[in-house]
């Protein structure tokens, strides 16, 4: 009986540790990707003819899911392309 309790305790510890790593990874990605993009667009109005327009047009128009939209935004940024796919 004691070995079963020990095994359950070890599995629970392993599961909680894994969950902790997932949360840390999520927060790391959020701080490295999402926050800088949101900060760049926060309270900013870009003038006509510039490669940037608005957060909604440049980022969120890529995908409805925030994380995928950020990754697509970065992908085009790293390629040196404009952020609108067919502008």
Image (cartoon, helix red, strand yellow):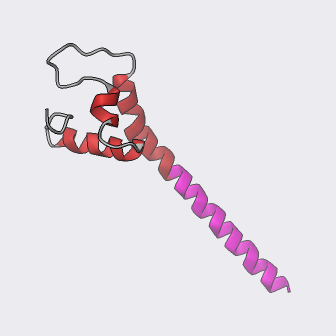
Q: Residue at x 59, y 56 (%)?
A: 20
User: Is residue 26 or residue 49 the one in the foreground?
Assistant: 49
Residue range in magenta is 1-24
Residue 23 placement, left or right of 76: right
User: Is residue 2 or residue 84 the one in the foreground?
Assistant: 84
User: Is residue 32 or residue 69 the one in the foreground?
Assistant: 69
Q: Quadrant of the C terminus?
A: top left
Residue 1 placement, left or right of 82: right
Residue 16 placement, left or right of 56: right
- Compared with residue 83, is residue 43 higher up or lower down, i.e. above or below? above
Q: Quadrant of the N terminus?
A: bottom right
Q: Residue at x 46, y 45 (%)?
A: 28
Which quadrant holds residue 78?
A: top left
Q: Residue at x 79, y 84 (%)?
A: 4
Q: Residue at x 29, y 41 (%)?
A: 62
Residue 49 placement, left or right of 37: left
Tell which residue pokes out farthest to the right in this image: 1
Which quadrant holds residue 70?
A: top left
- Compared with residue 49, is residue 81 higher up or lower down, i.e. above or below? below
- Compared with residue 84, is residue 41 higher up or lower down, i.e. above or below? above
Residue 26, horizontal then vertical, whole percent: 49, 49
Magenta-highlighted stretch: main secondary structure? helix
User: Is residue 22 or residue 75 the one in the foreground?
Assistant: 75
Query: Does the magenta-highlighted stretch encompass residue 56?
Result: no
Count the marks: how many? 0
Which quadrant holds residue 82?
A: top left
Query: Does the magenta-highlighted stretch encompass residue 9?
Result: yes
Residue 25, horizontal then vertical, whole percent: 48, 52
């Amino acid at each position: 009986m004691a070995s079963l309790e020990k095994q359950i305790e070890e599995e629970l510890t392993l599961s909680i540790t894994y969950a902790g790593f997932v949360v840390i990874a999520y927060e790391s990605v959020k701080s490295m990707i999402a926050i800088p993009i949101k900060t760049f667009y926060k309270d900013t109005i870009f003038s006509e003819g510039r490669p940037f327009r608005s957060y909604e047009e440049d980022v969120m128009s890529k995908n409805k899911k925030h994380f995928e939209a950020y990754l697509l935004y970065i992908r085009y940024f790293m390629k040196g392309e404009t952020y609108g796919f067919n502008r």
